[in-house]
Every structure is written in C-alpha cells, then in structure tokens.
Amino acid sequence: MDLILFLVFAGIAVVAAINVVVQRHPISSAVSLIAVMGSLAVLYLLLGAEFLAAAQVIVYAGAIMVLFVFVIMLLNAGGETKAGRSFVASLLGVPVLVALLALLAFFTARIYPRDPEVHFGGFRGGTAQAVGRALFTTYLLPFEITSILILIAIVGAIVLARKELE
Amino acid sequence: MMGHVPLSWFLMLSAVLFSLGVAGFIFRRNIITMFMSIELILNAVNLTFITFAYQRQQVAGHLFAFFVMVVAAAEAAVGLAIILTVFKNRGTLNIDDLDSMKN
C-alpha cells in the first residue's frame, strides 16, 4: 500500500517537474509546479511529517504559487521566444545534468547499501505539537531571527513595488 | 517486507527533482520560470531533510525544512517585486536581454 502510494505520487512529481522545465508558457510551468508540491505533500505525510505536509500545501501551493501566478497574470508576458543558446551550453548541458544525477545516485547507493524501509506510521515525531515544542525551545533563536527576515522581506517588497508606481 | 518503500527511493526522487530544477534554471530564458526552478530545487532539498528526519527519528530535520520554507516565502516576495520592477523598466522578461551590466 505504501509502495503504491509512493510510486503514484513520485510519478506525478517527476512528470510534473519535467513539465515545469519543458513548457513554453510560464503559467503552464506554474500549474505543473503546484502539482509537484501537492504530490510532495503526500510523500511528507508518508514520512510522518504531518505539520510540514499541511505547511507545504498552505505556504507553498497556497501562498507562494498564488504570488507567482498573480505576477505572471499581471505582467502578461506571453510565451518564451526560442533563444539562441550558446554552442557549449547546448552541447554539454544534458550530459552534465545526467552526470550530476548519476553522481547523486552513486553517493545515495554508497551511503545506503542496506535500505532501511519506510512505512506509514514509522515516525510519529512530526506532529504540530512536537514541531512546535522544538521550535519554541531548542530552535527559538533561529525562529526569532526568521521574524526579522520576514519583516525585511516585507519592507523590501513594498519599497520595490512603490518605486515602480512613480 | 512487501509494500514498504526503501528509504533511498525518496533520496533518488529528491535527486531527480533537484537535477530537473537545475536543468530548468540553466536552460530556460524566462526569468519567472528560472525563479520557479529555484523553488523546485528547494522542494527537492526539503524532501531530503524530511527523509533523513524519518531515518534518524528526530524532529530536527522537519525544522530545517520549515526554515527553508520560510526563507523561500521571503525570497519569493522580494524576487517577484524585483521582477515587477525590471519588467516596468525594461519591458522584457528574457534573461538574455537584461545584460546592462555587461558593458
């Protein structure tokens, strides 16, 4: 059951991620990216990360992607024109990416020769209670710094947006 | 045991998504699509963090993923504001046309 769940949603994630890269129009890429994030949320649940699965849907698929879609609609930039790429990039690009993937796969296989197995319910420490307790005790300082970061981001976004209104 | 998923499959999925994100960032010329590729890369890294949190049976990995999410939200807000300003000033989203620092 867990295996079927993993294969279905991993398949959706990979196909949608390929779609993000190959689609010409940004809005198609954005919708595909929402599909990737939704299927990743299911995989987070499988790994016992209840809180992060909810946060993934609310923050990523909800807030961030709405912002992206809003900007794409606002700019109405249309499809991407086929750009003349440099010769070196078109020649080396795909082999280099395959090499990167092979390197990551190699290290994964070397570090984990004996596969520990994942099953739903194998880790129960990802509830909102556990995450909140760790967040407000051990990780209190990074959490507070995060609030300053978000304040800076808000001020920065407002300054940039106001400048283009003038 | 039948029906259980090997842990490394999650790591492989993460590697595939990461590589696709890098491919999008390198090959696409639209600045918004490049930005979305960065979000794809961050999602792949989050999956790795959560997989290792499962393996170590510790909640610390979830918190790292949480902070990555927060930074991604802040980055998206500022980055999209910058993209808006660039588009108003230059009228293009093609990364090849935004080369005023070249000269």
Image (cartoon, helix red, strand yellow):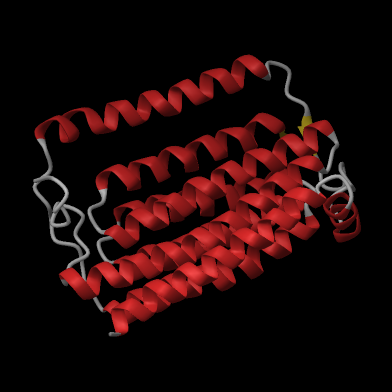
Judging depth in this view, the residue of A52 and A40 nearest the camera is: A52
State whether residue B101 appears in this view: yes
Tell me if I can see residue B3 in this picture: no
**Where does residue A55 sit, x and y in percent of width and height?**
69, 63
Residue A160, placed above or below residue A142: below
**Residue drawn where x is 16% and y is 69% of the image:** B90
Front residue of A104/A118: it is: A104
Judged left or right of residue A100, residue A127 is right
- Position of A129 with respect to A25 (left or right) is right
- The relative height of residue B43 versus residue B6 in the rendered view (above or below) is below
Front in this rendered view, residue B30 or A29: B30
Q: Quadrant of the C terminus of chain A?
A: bottom left
Residue nearest the observer in this picture, A110 or A66: A66
Q: Residue at x 25, y 61 (%)?
A: A24
Would you identify the image quadrant in which residue B6 lies?
top right
Q: Position of residue B76 (x, y in %)?
A: 47, 63
x and y percentages locating residue A108 in the rendered image? 59, 23
Find residue A69 and report its image quarter.
Answer: bottom left
In x, y percent, where is residue A102? Answer: 44, 23
